[in-house]
Image: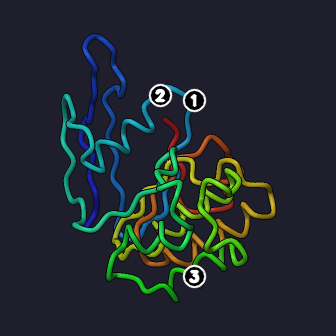
């Protein structure tokens, strides 16, 4: 089923955070949202995730299972990378599956370190691993590759593409090269 956004808007008092926006995302589609800071990309994702209520318009066809990578990593700093992934997913993922995913993202030697001891790029990969292991129909990612060097970014983008194959992927990025690498449709806001 397609996800349909019809004249979706969001205001905070007098401030228009998302001007009227309409979009149709087909099931299994890869889509990248590009646009300048402040144009409403993150607000749009927050509306899709149900973290905010729209001021106007509506969203139709959202699947029941959605996984997200936020701009902030939202990790528990005292817990290890492995625990951050398994804690969030409960019985849906084993420690072995989590360890395999973290290794795939280049974190093999740092699985048991508290995430506060990891670099920003390593923490980012823990957040991405957590999202990719969540059994979802829609993956929403807000600037997921920020803070990653070029080689690591390609490795992680390849993992995202492989793990979301056949699923709907919606990625916000400021980088046209990332959008092109991920393939799929590019929508400019």
Q: Find disc 3 in the rendering and name its residue.
A: 99
> Are there few (<14), some (14-19), or many (20+) residues within 10 Å of tag 3?
many
Q: Who is closer to the viewer here, 32 or 112?
A: 112
The location of residue 129, given as percent across then percent down, is 53, 69
Q: CA distance from mark 1 to mark 2?
A: 6 Å
The location of residue 140, given as percent across then percent down, is 42, 56
Residue name at image x 61 percent, y 57 percent: 123
Residue 137: quadrant of the picture: bottom left
Q: Earlier in the sequence, mark 3 or mark 2?
A: 2
Residue 41: quadrant of the picture: top left
Q: Find disc 1 in the rendering and name its residue.
A: 36
**Disc nearest the viewer among 1 and 3:** 3
For numbered disc 1, what is the local secondary structure? loop
Q: Who is closer to the viewer here, 174 or 79?
A: 79
Q: Find disc 2 in the rendering and name its residue.
A: 39
Q: Earlier in the sequence, mark 1 or mark 3?
A: 1
Compared across the picture, whether 147 is left or right of 168 comes to right
């Amino acid at each position: 089923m397609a996800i349909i956004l019809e004249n979706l808007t969001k205001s905070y008092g007098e401030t228009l955070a998302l001007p009227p926006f309409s979009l149709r995302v087909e099931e299994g589609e890869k889509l990248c949202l590009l646009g300048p800071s402040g144009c409403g990309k993150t607000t749009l994702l927050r509306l899709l995730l149900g973290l905010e209520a729209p001021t106007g318009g509506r969203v139709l066809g959202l699947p029941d299972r959605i996984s997200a990578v936020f701009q902030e990593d939202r990790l528990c700093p005292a817990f290890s990378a492995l625990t951050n992934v398994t804690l969030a997913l409960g019985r849906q993922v084993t420690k072995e599956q989590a360890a395999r995913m973290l290794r795939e993202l280049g974190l093999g030697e740092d699985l048991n370190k508290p995430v506060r001891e990891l670099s920003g790029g390593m923490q980012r990969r823990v957040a991405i691993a957590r999202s990719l292991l969540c059994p979802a129909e829609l993956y929403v990612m807000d600037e997921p590759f920020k803070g990653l060097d070029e080689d690591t970014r390609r490795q992680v983008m390849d993992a995202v593409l492989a793990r979301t194959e056949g699923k709907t992927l919606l990625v916000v990025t400021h980088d046209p090269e990332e959008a092109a690498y991920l393939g799929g449709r590019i929508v400019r806001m």
